């Protein structure tokens, strides 16, 4: 590992991304490093960035440190600028000088330094880190109310290792008010909190207000260490069933599988509850039981689109007519239509009309009519299909009725060109490309006809150029 503090540029340059290093050097050369100090093995200072208030930077061995700027990674350009200022300025180590001070001299020096705003921050953090941190939390709440605060949230996150449980709890509570997604900050702050004898009741309270993945995992990790207390807190009901779901997860984490499954069964109220139970049963290899609850959900919730994973499971492992019928009712498709036709035999024709009435996609109807050679129905479909559905319908007809597909591609492309926008021209070019795959000559002729019809549209000629070559 290169020496630290560094003696020259090469001692840190290889550890900094090239672009960050370049911008850091530019910052140093522009005179943006306002203060630089060495204290033992750390380099600290102030660097003027794009914000009005200078950024506070601290760098230690291995280029581990912090900066109050919003840049998500470290080292940032401000840290690089500070390192350049250090190696170029040959800053002396203050540690021996500080050790040589008498108590009275040290007190007098601190009082004088406290009058310098840039230094006062470091003194406040060093002498009363908890109080300084709580003041930062108050500023963070105000920043959130103004619609910002992400830079402040990051700055406090970097100071969490210097404060205790009370301060971390205050930070976590304020994060729930963030006008942006707080999940990355919650996750990092919770790692610190879990190392500080966390309070399960506090974690649960946060989770019930903000049911995030990070808070769920934190409660489960802490709950495994205090299982009896965690399970006690999870008794009773809550409006959204969050405690019930958390209780089941904790039981699984503790290895109490049957108790966990019982908790999931007790809470079967909505589609999501069934999905959770079925997925857990599948993970345990209990397929028959999973199918039983998937069938129960199908019977309870009918056409709810969220049922699709359970209906797919039933079709894959049983494939009863009622399974195909239920899935077709949620999401009409050719596979289930043909399966019902094969499995119901003559009985299929009694419900064929009802099945077709559920199909809203002209392309799917076209495929069904082609397979059944129902030419009258297909003719009615072609006459009634709205122009916006022409491309999908043409794609469905490419193999069975290529001439009709070519006609639909032409019509759809002409409608796009009539809109007169670059995006519409791009879509017209895509449609004519599909036409060219069926009939290269027809695609080129149609493209040429469009360019000739609109000679004052250079954007159209540009988009259709590949078809004219």
Image (tube, helix red, strand yellow):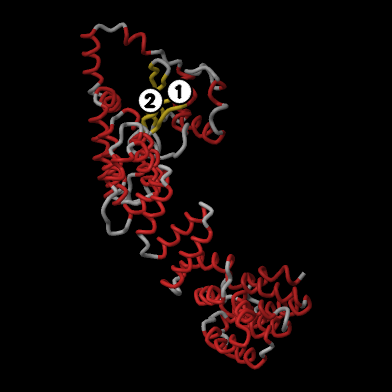
Q: Is residue 414 visible?
A: no
- Using the image as rendered, state which of residue 77 and residue 451 is in the foreground: 77
Assign a secondary structure to mark 2.
strand
Q: Is residue 247 visible?
A: yes
Q: Which label is found at residue 45?
A: 2
Q: Label 2: few (<14), some or many (≥20) within 10 Å?
A: many
Based on the displayed image, in which of its 4 quarters is residue 157 positioned? top left
x 39%, y 29%: residue: 57
Estimate the x, y position of residue 322 in percent, counting from the top left. 53, 76
The residue identified by callout 1 is 85
Q: Label 1: few (<14), some or many (≥20) within 10 Å?
A: many
Estimate the x, y position of residue 348 in percent, counting from the top left. 59, 85
x 35%, y 38%: residue: 222
Q: Are marks 2 and 1 in contact (CB under 8 Å)?
A: yes
The relative height of residue 146 versus residue 380 in the rendered view (above or below) is above
> Which part of the image, by quadrant, shows the N terminus?
top right
Assign a secondary structure to mark 1.
helix
x 41%, y 21%: residue: 43
Estimate the x, y position of residue 69 in percent, counting from the top left. 39, 37
Q: How far apart are the two marked residues, 2 and 1, measured between alpha carbons? A: 10 Å
The relative height of residue 145 versus residue 119 in the rendered view (above or below) is below
- Using the image as rendered, state which of residue 30 and residue 332 is in the foreground: 332
């Amino acid at each position: 590992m290169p020496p630290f503090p560094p003696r020259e540029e090469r001692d840190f340059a290889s550890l900094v991304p090239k672009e960050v290093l370049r911008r850091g050097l530019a910052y140093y050369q522009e005179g943006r490093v306002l203060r630089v100090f060495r204290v033992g093995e750390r380099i600290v200072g102030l660097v003027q960035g794009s914000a009005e208030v200078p950024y506070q930077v601290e760098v230690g061995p291995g280029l581990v440190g912090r900066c109050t700027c919003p840049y998500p990674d470290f080292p940032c350009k401000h840290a690089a600028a500070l390192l350049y200022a250090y190696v170029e300025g040959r800053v002396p180590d203050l540690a021996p000088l500080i050790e040589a001070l008498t108590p009275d001299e040290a007190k007098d020096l601190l009082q004088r330094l406290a009058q310098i705003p840039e230094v006062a921050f470091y003194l406040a953090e060093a002498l009363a880190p908890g109080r300084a941190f709580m003041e930062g939390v108050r500023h963070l709440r105000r920043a959130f109310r103004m619609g910002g605060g992400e830079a402040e949230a990051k700055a406090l996150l970097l100071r969490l290792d210097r404060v205790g449980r009370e301060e971390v709890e205050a930070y976590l509570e304020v994060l729930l008010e963030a006008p942006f997604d707080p999940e990355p900050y919650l996750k990092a702050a919770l790692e610190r909190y879990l190392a500080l004898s966390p309070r399960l009741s506090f974690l649960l309270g946060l989770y019930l207000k903000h049911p995030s993945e990070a808070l769920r995992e934190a409660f489960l990790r802490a709950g495994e260490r205090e299982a009896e207390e965690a399970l006690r807190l999870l008794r009773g009901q809550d409006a959204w069933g969050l405690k019930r779901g958390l209780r089941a997860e904790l039981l699984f984490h503790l290895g109490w599988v049957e108790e966990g499954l019982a908790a999931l069964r007790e809470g079967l109220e909505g589609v999501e509850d069934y999905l959770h139970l079925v997925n857990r049963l599948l993970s345990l290899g209990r397929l028959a039981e999973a199918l039983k609850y998937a069938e129960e959900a199908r019977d309870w919730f009918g056409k709810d689109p969220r049922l699709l994973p359970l209906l797919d499971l039933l079709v894959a492992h049983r494939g009863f007519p009622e399974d195909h019928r239920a899935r077709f009712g949620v999401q009409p498709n050719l596979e289930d239509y043909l399966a019902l036709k094969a499995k119901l035999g003559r009985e299929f024709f009694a419900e064929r009309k009802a099945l077709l009435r559920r199909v809203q996609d002209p392309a799917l109807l076209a495929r069904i009519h082609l397979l059944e050679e129902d030419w009258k129905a297909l003719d009615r479909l072609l006459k009634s299909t709205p122009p916006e559905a022409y491309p999908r319908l043409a794609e469905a007809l490419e193999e069975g009725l290529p001439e009709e597909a070519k006609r639909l591609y032409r019509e759809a492309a002409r409608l796009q060109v009539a809109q007169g926008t670059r995006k519409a021209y791009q879509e017209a070019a895509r449609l004519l490309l599909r036409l060219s795959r069926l009939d290269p000559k027809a695609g080129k002729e149609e493209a040429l006809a469009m360019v000739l019809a609109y000679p004052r549209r250079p954007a159209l000629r540009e988009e259709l150029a590949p078809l004219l070559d």
